[in-house]
């Protein structure tokens, strides 16, 4: 705990676009996986791994949001 009084309230950060940014980052990985399978470089299991990675990212982001869609490090918000 610091000795300085907090004169301004903490700014509220909205993370509404963060989920869409993460999806946009996963799309190139999925496209590359599909292209590699189509070229015959890797097996179809590679696409399964890419999809599984995307689903795990979605579940992790949902779990980190906590109840009510708020981040766990911001109690009461």
Image: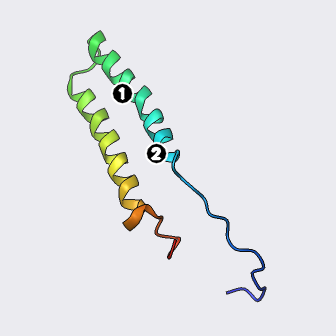
Above or below 20: residue 39 = above
Camera sees residue 66: no
Q: Position of residue 4 (x, y in %)?
A: 78, 85
* Observer-nearest of 7 and 42: 7
Q: Can you say which quadrant of the picture contains the N terminus?
A: bottom right
Which mark is on residue 7? none
Residue 29 location, quadrant = top left
Q: Position of residue 72 (x, y in %)?
A: 46, 69
* Observer-nearest of 5 and 26: 5
Residue at the bottom extreme of this rendering = 3
Judged from the image, the secondary structure of the residue bearing numbered disc 2 is helix
The residue drawn where x is 34% and y is 16% is: 35
Whichever of labels 2 and 1 marks the residue nearer the N terminus, that label is 2
Residue 66 location, quadrant = bottom left
The residue drawn where x is 52% and y is 44% is: 17
Q: Which residue is mark 1?
A: 30
Q: Number of labelled discs?
A: 2
Q: Counting other residues with Cα less than 10 Å from the Cα at mark 1, is it few (<14), some (14-19), or many (20 or more)? A: some
Above or below 72: residue 48 = above
Q: Is residue 63 left or right of residue 48?
A: right
Q: Is residue 67 left or right of residue 49?
A: right
Q: Which residue is mark 2?
A: 19
The residue drawn where x is 36% and y is 60% is: 63
Q: Counting other residues with Cα less than 10 Å from the Cα at mark 2, is it few (<14), some (14-19), or many (20 or more)? A: some
Mark 2 or 1, which is nearer the eye? 2
Camera sees residue 3: yes
The residue drawn where x is 31% and y is 20% is: 34
C-alpha gap between disc 2 and disc 1: 17 Å
Residue at the top extreme of this rendering = 39
């Amino acid at each position: 705990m610091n000795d300085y009084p907090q004169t301004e309230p903490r700014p509220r950060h909205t993370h509404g676009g963060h989920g869409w940014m993460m999806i946009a980052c996963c799309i190139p990985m999925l496209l590359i996986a599909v292209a590699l399978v189509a070229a015959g470089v890797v097996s179809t299991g590679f696409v399964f791994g890419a999809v599984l990675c995307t689903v795990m990212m979605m579940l992790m982001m949902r779990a980190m949001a906590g109840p009510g869609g708020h981040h766990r490090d911001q109690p009461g918000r």
